[in-house]
């Protein structure tokens, strides 16, 4: 079943908390809502579940308008960031609870619960109480409860945020597999770009209640359509630079010539913003074709096999990701090279500007 | 400026346990050198918070001595230990402005007003809080509040150690970078001993000069981030550090070659004979297992994961699951992939502990 | 797909309660409203009086208006006195109550005991307690040389009623404050210790701000109860000596049932009700607005 949000908006006390959101989720797809806290991820999920009513727009299930349908009648399951389980019921009863409410026969309940427990590796823990389980086991119980409902729409609101780093890695790999067999539409909210990349599927980047881009995750990552989408989808944060374009020759805001950026070659002159991710920069002597900037190292962070160099280049502090372990001392002057082909150009409105093909230029 | 010494520190909730398993914190000897930044890294329940609480005074260890410099402070109450602590969620005084929050510890110690003002201005400048000094603390964002919590600890000039208990938990990923680099700069500027508890390896490895990896109440390895990455002494360190963690293959090691069921591979050193029947594994990080167009071991590709700045291939080599890194220029991957394993960065583990080999 | 069935049968269970509320609350209230705009001696002879009763009541120059004013003033003074004593006392005792260990349960039960006693029994207890011949309290005070006589001395009567209310209802404030204090995470106390804060500074900067929401409830509840107080002073002093402790409720009782002056009594009770409602509404709105503004 496909689920669509058609110009959904939510107004609270005069302000647009959610603004004109249009998204279509295909059956059996994994969709990620990526954005910082308070961007509207939880609000959108609540609207999809039917816990809140949108002030404008429609929710469409297979083309049918289900906006006014109360949550009890919707086929939806939700897993939260806090491990939410009934504290006085055993794991078995917790997983069985939605089936008991629906009034299914005991034999059916038994088999479905055992199947879900098997998938989530909880078979040995079925008689325990949630208080006797670790964080990861409690969250797996909550996920099993969502799985057993066989809902058409499964909403996961940062479900792994309260778990340890390594546990998160493991569960993250399992989640898509667990739900893909049910053919449900899976919507996963997260603040971390790396989670979106690891999960794959399709990603919607959210900023202040608006969807800035929606598409296959790799495409949104490599080809952001707006500067907000690029910012949200960068970890370390996007390095930015305000420039003035003159037929492809780019000058910094204070008039210094920087080089040529192909993406701006056939674009009108004016003010633009360039952005690039940490791994597009390298440290070394100026190389031909690259834009070079002199910077003072403020701090170097080593993470195992990579080094993050924070360099103050005069108009901001940039983070450069360099392979290997390099210790540049604070205060040291280094030269930052940036490959213009890996830079994103954005115009004054924040829209992405790409190089025009010769055919477009000719037209 | 003092160093902190742990002398046979151990903690158990039930007196003196009969064996190791009764300990919350197994016996540990370590010297925290002044001026260094340390991270306590480990999964939930590994004892890192207990260890931090022993140092801060919230927990009195059931065994051992804690020394600040030469002074035995094992039973000394927290407020007399000259430490500062930053908690998981921001702890600020709601009714006061930012400046009053920062001045609070000095006011309680009856410092003269001019000294207080000067110190507050210094610390606010260091943490970029100068613009907010006169605002009410409770209206600020989470990261500003954490900076205030940190500032309150730094404002006292007699602080010998700053302890952090997972301080970035409530901070957004984008702001974590800023706050982390600020912490590092503060560390350099003030030359304080800092101990940082976390379960997030990126935080630990980027912040610390030395990392203490803990598991199940025990300190498994203590080393620099590079040492932990390139030479994990224990399979747990290999697994826990690195995303994803180390690949492990059960093997038989003879001389400078390892025999895994189904294939053979070269090792970077020569190893003495190992006793039979024990758990012998070969470990190599995905960063050193590369997909290659040239010669290599043939593997079946299960799935490719695009992480933006690198791509990982989850493969099966003679039935063993492995994670390999794909080079940037390898655009597409078919069903099979040749992989090359860097022998120099392959380690041998006997019963989970690394075995040192001789140079070949 | 499993759908949750929708079951509206539960509404039928609500009907009897609805009927009961109608019978015991709404119908009598409307009767009072009816009386307040009519002139009647209760014998089913009704003469329309419009708002005359209200006009007389709110005009301090008339006899009834003067009487209402005095009673209102006495009640307000009583409320304020009790609040000023009970809130700080309640918080202070809550701060001393044990938070961990075996003593928590028993101490909370002991603290709550005075609240569990039926209100007229409370009155009776204190009535005997304060007698100068056989009452411990009365005899002790007189033995100490203080001139204490509940039935003849206005000051003695007032102090006795205040003390009785404090004894009876401070436990409510204690329990509410205790719950509020227990909700404060440990990290705040730990941070305060590290900051070297004194006990008083901890109270002022951590505990009091975090108790704010609880205190709003406590003040609201205590104000409403002291403003409406009837049983206890009635049993102990009967409104005397003279009219020294005649609060609004007692006065109402005298007018309505004693003098069977239903019109005046009805008007008075409605005005009484509206005053209570208005004060609580204003207080609550101010407190929540302050909360909201402080968060900005």
Image (cartoon, coloured by chain):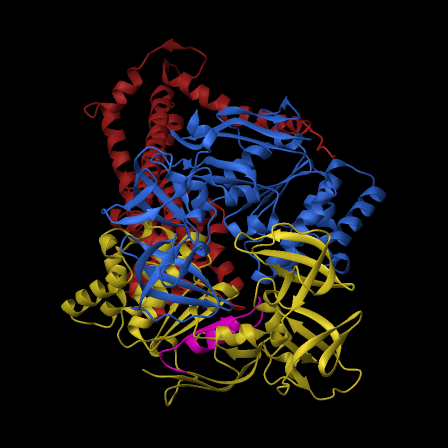
Q: Which quadrant holds the C terminus of chain B?
A: bottom right
Whether residue A88 can be seen here: no
Image vertical order of residue C260 relative to residue A348, above or below: above
**Which stretch appears magenta?**
B33-56
Q: Nearer the viewer, residue B62 or C79?
A: B62
Residue B75 spot, x, y in % from top left:
43, 83
Image vertical order of residue B197 relative to residue A167, above or below: below
Question: Is residue B38 shown in magenta?
Answer: yes
Q: Nearer the viewer, residue C174 or B203?
A: B203
Residue C245 spot, x, y in % from top left:
30, 41
Q: Colour of chain B?
A: yellow
Q: Quadrant of residue B289?
A: bottom right
At 80% from the left edge and 82% from the top edge, which residue is drawn?
B277
In the rendered structure, the answer to whether residue C48 lies left or right of residue C64 reads right
Colour red maps to chain: C
Residue A246 spot, x, y in % from top left:
29, 38
At 56% from the left edge and 61% from the top edge, which residue is drawn?
A165
Residue B349 spot, x, y in % from top left:
67, 79
At 37% from the left edge and 42% from the top edge, which residue is drawn?
C220
Question: Is residue B348 shown in magenta?
Answer: no
Q: Nearer the viewer, residue C2 or A321?
A: A321
Q: Colour of chain A?
A: blue
Going by the picture, which residue comes out furthest to the left? B114
Q: Nearer the viewer, residue A230 or B210?
A: A230
Whether residue A118 can be seen here: yes
Q: Which quadrant holds the N terminus of chain B?
A: bottom left
């Amino acid at each position: 079943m496909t689920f669509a949000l058609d110009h959904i908006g939510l107004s609270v006390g005069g302000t647009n908390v959610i603004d004109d959101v249009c998204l279509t989720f295909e059956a059996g797809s994994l969709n990620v809502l990526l954005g910082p806290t308070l961007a509207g991820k939880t609000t959108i999920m609540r609207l999809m579940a039917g816990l809140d009513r949108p002030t404008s727009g429609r929710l469409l299930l297979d083309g049918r308008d289900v906006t006014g349908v109360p949550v009890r009648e919707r086929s939806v399951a939700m897993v939260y960031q806090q491990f939410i389980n009934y504290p006085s019921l055993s794991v078995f009863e917790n997983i069985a609870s939605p089936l008991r409410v629906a009034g299914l026969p005991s034999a059916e309940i038994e088999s479905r619960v055992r199947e879900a427990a098997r998938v989530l590796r909880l078979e040995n823990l079925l008689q325990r109480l949630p208080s006797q389980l670790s964080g990861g086991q409690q969250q797996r119980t909550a996920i099993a409860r969502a799985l057993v409902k066989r809902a058409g729409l499964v909403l996961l609101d940062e479900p792994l945020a309260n778990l340890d780093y390594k546990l998160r890695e493991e569960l993250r790999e399992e989640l898509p597999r667990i739900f893909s067999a049910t053919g449900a539409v899976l919507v996963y909210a997260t603040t971390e770009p790396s989670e979106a990349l690891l999960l794959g599927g399709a990603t919607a980047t959210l900023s202040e209640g608006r969807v800035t881009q929606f598409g296959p995750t790799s495409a949104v990552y490599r080809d952001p359509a707006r500067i907000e989408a690029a910012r949200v989808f960068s970890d370390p944060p996007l390095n930015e630079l305000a420039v003035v374009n003159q037929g492809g020759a780019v000058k910094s805001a204070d008039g210094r010539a920087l080089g040529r950026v192909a993406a701006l070659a056939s674009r009108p002159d004016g003010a633009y913003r360039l952005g690039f991710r940490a791994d597009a920069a390298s440290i070394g002597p100026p190389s031909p074709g690259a834009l070079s900037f002199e910077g003072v190292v403020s701090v170097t962070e080593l993470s195992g096999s990579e080094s993050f160099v924070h360099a103050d280049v005069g108009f901001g502090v940039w983070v450069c990701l360099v392979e290997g372990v390099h210790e540049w001392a604070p205060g040291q002057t280094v030269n930052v090279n940036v490959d213009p082909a890996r830079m994103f150009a954005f115009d004054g409105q924040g829209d992405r500007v790409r190089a025009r093909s010769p055919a477009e230029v000719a037209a | 400026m003092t160093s902190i010494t742990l002398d046979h520190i151990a903690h158990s909730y039930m007196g003196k346990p009969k064996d190791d398993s009764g300990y919350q914190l197994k016996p540990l000897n370590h010297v925290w050198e002044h001026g260094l930044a340390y991270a306590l890294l480990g999964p939930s329940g590994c004892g890192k918070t207990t260890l931090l609480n022993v140092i801060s005074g919230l927990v009195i260890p059931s065994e051992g001595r804690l020394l600040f410099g030469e002074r035995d402070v094992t039973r000394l109450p927290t407020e007399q230990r000259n430490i500062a602590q930053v908690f998981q969620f921001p702890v600020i005084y709601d009714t006061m402005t930012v400046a009053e929050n920062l001045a609070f510890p000095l006011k309680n110690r009856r410092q003269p007003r001019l000294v207080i003002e000067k110190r507050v201005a210094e610390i606010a400048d260091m943490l970029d809080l100068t613009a907010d000094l006169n605002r009410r603390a409770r209206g600020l964002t989470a990261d500003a509040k954490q900076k205030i919590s940190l500032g309150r600890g730094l404002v006292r000039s007699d602080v010998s150690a700053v302890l952090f208990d997972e301080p970035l938990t409530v901070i957004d990923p984008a702001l974590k970078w800023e706050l982390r680099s600020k912490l590092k700069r503060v560390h350099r500027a003030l030359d304080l001993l800092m101990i940082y508890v976390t379960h997030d390896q990126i935080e630990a490895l980027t912040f610390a000069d030395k990392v203490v990896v803990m598991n199940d109440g025990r300190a498994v390895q203590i080393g620099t981030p590079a040492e932990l990455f390139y030479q994990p002494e224990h399979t747990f360190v290999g697994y826990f550090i690195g995303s994803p963690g180390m690949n492990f293959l059960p093997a038989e090691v003879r001389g400078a070659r390892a025999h895994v069921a189904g294939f053979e591979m070269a090792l970077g050193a020569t190893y003495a004979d190992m006793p039979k029947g024990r758990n012998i594994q070969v470990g190599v990080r995905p960063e050193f297992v590369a997909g290659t167009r040239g010669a290599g071991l043939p593997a079946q590709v299960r799935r490719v994961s695009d992480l933006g700045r690198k791509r990982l291939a989850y493969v099966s080599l003679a039935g063993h699951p492995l994670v390999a890194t794909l080079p940037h220029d390898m655009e597409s991957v078919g069903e099979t992939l040749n992989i090359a394993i860097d022998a120099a960065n392959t380690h041998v583990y006997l019963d989970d502990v690394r075995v040192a080999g001789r140079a070949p | 797909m499993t759908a949750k069935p929708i079951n509206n049968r539960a509404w039928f269970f609500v009907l009897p309660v609805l009927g009961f509320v109608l019978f015991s609350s709404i119908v009598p209230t409307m009767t009072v409203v009816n009386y307040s705009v009519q002139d009647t001696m209760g014998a089913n002879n009704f003469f329309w009086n419009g708002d005359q009763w209200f006009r007389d009541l709110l005009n301090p120059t008339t006899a009834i208006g003067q009487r209402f004013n005095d009673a209102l003033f006495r009640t307000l003074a009583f409320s304020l006195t009790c609040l000023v004593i009970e809130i700080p006392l309640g918080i202070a005792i809550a701060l001393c109550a044990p938070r961990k260990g075996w003593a928590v349960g028993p101490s909370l039960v002991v603290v709550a005991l005075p609240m569990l006693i039926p209100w007229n029994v409370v009155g009776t207890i204190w009535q005997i307690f304060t007698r100068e011949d056989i009452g411990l309290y009365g005899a002790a005070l007189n033995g100490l040389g203080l001139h204490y006589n509940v039935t003849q001395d206005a000051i003695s009567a007032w102090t006795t009623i205040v003390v009785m209310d404090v004894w009876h209802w401070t436990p409510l404030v204690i329990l509410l404050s205790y719950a509020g204090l227990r909700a404060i995470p440990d990290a705040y106390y730990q941070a305060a210790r590290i900051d070297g804060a004194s006990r008083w500074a901890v109270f002022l900067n951590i505990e009091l701000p975090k108790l704010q929401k609880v205190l709003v409830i406590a003040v609201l509840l205590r104000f409403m109860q002291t403003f409406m107080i009837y049983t206890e002073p009635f049993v102990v002093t009967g409104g005397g000596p003279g009219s020294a402790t005649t609060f609004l409720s007692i006065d109402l009782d005298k007018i309505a049932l004693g003098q069977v002056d239903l019109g005046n009594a009805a008007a008075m009770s409605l005005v009484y009700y509206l005053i209570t409602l208005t004060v609580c509404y204003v207080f609550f709105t101010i407190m929540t607005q302050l909360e909201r503004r402080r968060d900005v």
